[in-house]
Image: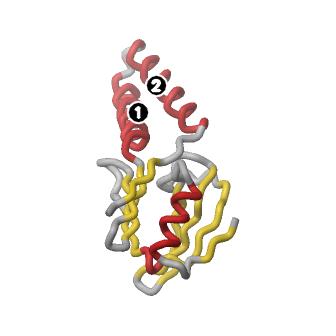
Amino acid sequence: MNRTFQSKVGWWYWIVIGITSVLLFFFFWEHYLLCTILCATVVIFEIEMLIHTQYVITGDGWLKVETGRFIPNASLEIDQILRIRKVRSMTFWQPALSFKRLEVVFKKHGKVRSISLSPKNQEDFIRCLLKKNEAIQFYD
């Protein structure tokens, strides 16, 4: 059975959407076509991520990170997860919409990699991962 966790959305993400929406309105009102198209594209990406960012723990041992239609999804085997720790990070290229994140360190193709996630219920998310792989180290 699959378990889905929605991303927590931080205050900063709402501010970013608000600023780009105001800019979109301003550029549209002033007839700046190129800026309007650019801002509209950014707002569409932001809303798409807001609606569709989620983390799915599958019954067959995979963690799927879904971020919408425009950004490629990621998948990793739960058996390959080495450790998880709570972090506060402001990196914008991660599939997390909050600064309160979980850094998931895993092995993929022989290399150690990491990804930051921000599930709403972090404790439940960690508990589900530990049920699938008890060898995961957790640092608070």
49 up-or-down from 5: above or below: above
The amino acid at mark 1 is: Val
Task: Decide: few, some or many residues near mark 1? Use Cα within 10 Å; few <14, some 14-19, many ≥20.
Answer: many
Instruction: Identify the residue at image location x=38%, y=51%.
Output: 67
Image quadrant for the C terminus? bottom right
Could you say whether the residue bearing mark 1 is in a helix, strand or loop? helix
Instruction: Identify the residue at image location x=46%, y=17%.
Output: 26
Q: Residue beneath label 2, please?
A: 21
Q: Are marks 2 and 1 in contact (CB under 8 Å)?
A: yes
Observer-nearest residue: 89 or 3? 3
Could you say whether the residue bearing mark 2 is in a helix, strand or loop? helix
Numbered tag placed on residue 43 in the rendering: 1
Q: Residue furthest top?
A: 29
113 up-or-down from 1: above or below: below
Task: Decide: few, some or many residues near mark 2? Use Cα within 10 Å; few <14, some 14-19, many ≥20.
Answer: some
Left or right relative to 12: residue 57 = left
Quadrant of residue 72 in the image?
bottom left
Marked residue nearer the N-terminal end (2 or 1): 2
